[in-house]
Image (cartoon, rainbow, N blue to C red):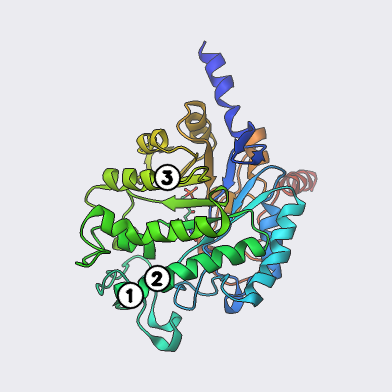
Amino acid sequence: MVQQAETEAAIPLTTPYRMGQLELSHRVVLAPMTRCRSYGNVPQPHAAVYYAQRATRGGVLISEGTGLSTTSQGFPEMPGVWTQEQVEAWKPIVDAVHRKGAFFFCQLGHVGRASTNEFQPDGQAPISSTDEQISPDAESGMVYSKPRRLRADEIPAVVEDFRRAARNAVEAGFDGVEIHGAHGMLLEQFMKDGANDRTDEYGGSLENRCRFAVEVIDAVVREVGAHRVGIKLSPFADDMDCEDSDPVALGHYMIQQLNKYEGFLYCHMVEPRMAIVEGHRQIPRGLLQFRKAFNGTFIVAGGYDREEGNKALGEHYADLIAYGRLFLANPDLPKRFDLDAPLNKYDRSTFYTQDPVVGYTDYRFLEDSNKNNQSSTQA
Ligand SMILES: Cc1cc2nc3c(=O)[nH]c(=O)nc-3n(C[C@H](O)[C@H](O)[C@H](O)COP(=O)(O)O)c2cc1C
């Protein structure tokens, strides 16, 4: 009986799944990861290599957070999708992914106050829900600039930036877009009461705090169709000082909004912080209530490995699992999971560096590691 359960548990990550109109061949999704290698905010040819390496027939990739305006940047060399030059630069990258048979979603993000004056046009203050600065990060030494509180009458222009970016992403060939509503970025700065101290129609009640995100969702859905739109949310996280006093109510409110759109494609949610217990990753599994409430495809992320992913899928806790760091370091992650092969380790020091190869496209494939092992055995 136990034996049988174990055999079944190994299957789920590599089983097919239908997400809206898309026929997926497995459940291993590339999580969106900022890689800081799009010089001058223009995606580069090396991104085609990077993403194509991680593309498989019937797999899903989500792009790194991609900017939608000159104020949306907060990391060096982030790509954008607001100019025609950027759209043209994405086209061969999306093509390379499609040629491998994978589906590709563009994550549309605005960092809000998670930025500095240096990243902003004319050295202006980053925009946010508030004029409260993020507390300096002792670990990374990062000091974010004091933001400027957006006036309510400025918000429609930012909604319009999201809409145009979604249109552009589809023009570039992406299968859809993921609205970045997680990790302390601009939309979350409005959603969470720990970062929203407004008294206008965009602050105070849960409905008011979520208004901006809801307006963005509505504009993007109207522009490209609900079947092309997903969203990433992290109600339980506290990134960039974005914490909510009632994450359960926040998560449920947002799910209710998504459910209003027939065929809204997916909701991608981040687990409460994972723990390492006796050397094993332990996922807190705090998202079941949202999974049950949401009508579309539910993607979970945050600390998953092969075992935890299989378990979550086997127990119908999620439809798909997004893998970040493990996929970054293992371009052939779905294959490695299938074969239960050992994994490359990720190198944190090159996550956000600007080299077009090192820490980016030079992680080994299984065949290379095997060849290498054989030659080192022979030597
Ligand atoms: C280098 C790096 C960059 C990231 N950039 C983004 C991003 O642009 N957008 C986003 O929503 N999440 C981003 N994340 C978070 C990942 O999408 C994912 O949620 C997180 O890494 C947890 O998954 P994991 O434990 O499988 O790595 C990033 C993570 C890493 C490691």
- What amino acid is labelled 2 in the image? Pro
Name above or below for residue 344 compared with residue 181. above
Residue 20, quarter of picture: top right
Within-10-Å neighbours for mark 1: few <14, some 14–19, many 20+: few
Q: Position of residue 263 (x, y in %)?
A: 52, 43
Asked if residue 359 lies left or right of residue 58, the reply is: left
Local secondary structure at mark 2: helix
Q: Is mark 2 within 8 Å of ligand 1?
A: no
Residue under numbered circle 2: 156
Q: Position of residue 320 (x, y in %)?
A: 54, 39
Q: Nearer the viewer, residue 157 or 102?
A: 157
> Residue beneath label 3, please?
260
Q: Earlier in the sequence, mark 2 or mark 3?
A: 2
Give the CA separation, mark 2 to mark 1.
7 Å
Residue at 58% x, 72% y is 354
Image position of 120 with respect to 44: above or below: below
Whether label 2 touches label 3, CB < 8 Å:
no
On residue 153, the disc is 1
Pointers 3 and 1 in contact (CB under 8 A)? no
Residue 40 position, x and y percent, is 58, 79
Q: Secondary structure at mark 3?
A: loop
> What amino acid is found at the position of numbered circle 1 in the picture?
Asp
The extreme top residue here reads 1
Mark 3 vs mark 1: which is more N-terminal? Answer: 1
Q: Are marks 2 and 1 in contact (CB under 8 Å)?
A: yes
Distance Cα–Cα, label 2 vs label 3: 21 Å
Tell me if mark 2 has few (under 14), some (14-19) or many (20+) residues whose alpha carbon lies within 10 angstroms of its own.
Answer: few
